[in-house]
Amino acid sequence: MSSSTSTQTFTVTGMTCGHCVASVTEEVSELAGVESVDVDLATGSVTVTSTTPLEDDALRAAVEDAGYALA
C-alpha cells in the first residue's frame, strides 16, 4: 500500500451473521476510492482502506443500503 491511503474504522449496528458482513462489505466496497473493507462481526467494526478519506454521508448511505446503521 502506498502512503497516500486512508484507513478509517467505523461501528455498524444490526449485523448478526455472515450474510450481514457480506452485505456491508459489498455496499461499502462500491464507494469511490475504497481499496479494502474488513468487517468484524463480533465487534461490529468496519475498517475501510481508501485512496482518500471517506465522506461520512456516503459511508452512512452505503451501510443503510445494506440494511444496517452506522453507530
Image (cartoon, rainbow, N blue to C red):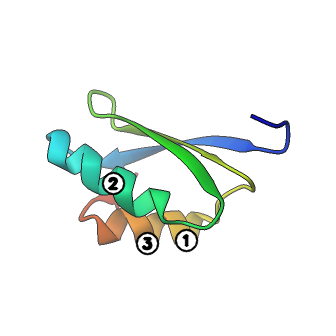
Cα separation between marks 1 and 3: 6 Å
Query: What residue sits 27% from the left and 59% below the top?
Result: 68
The disc placed on residue 61 is 3
Vertical comparison of 15 with 28: above or below: above
Asked whether the residues under the numbered discs 2 and 3 touch, taking CB atoms below 8 Å apart as contact, a structural biologist would say no
- The 10 Å Cα crowd at callout 1, few under 14, some 14 to 19, many 20 or more, is few
Q: What residue is shown with label 1?
A: 57
Query: What residue sits 82% from the left and 37% below the top?
Result: 2
Picture mark count: 3
Is any atom of residue 38 visible in this view?
yes
SS for callout 1? helix
SS for callout 2? helix
The disc placed on residue 65 is none
The disc placed on residue 24 is 2
Asked whether the residues under the numbered discs 1 and 3 touch, taking CB atoms below 8 Å apart as contact, a structural biologist would say yes
Circle nearer the viewer, 1 or 2 = 2
Residue 12, x across and y down, in percent: 36, 48
Amino acid type indicated by mark 2: Val
Which image quarter is the N terminus in? top right
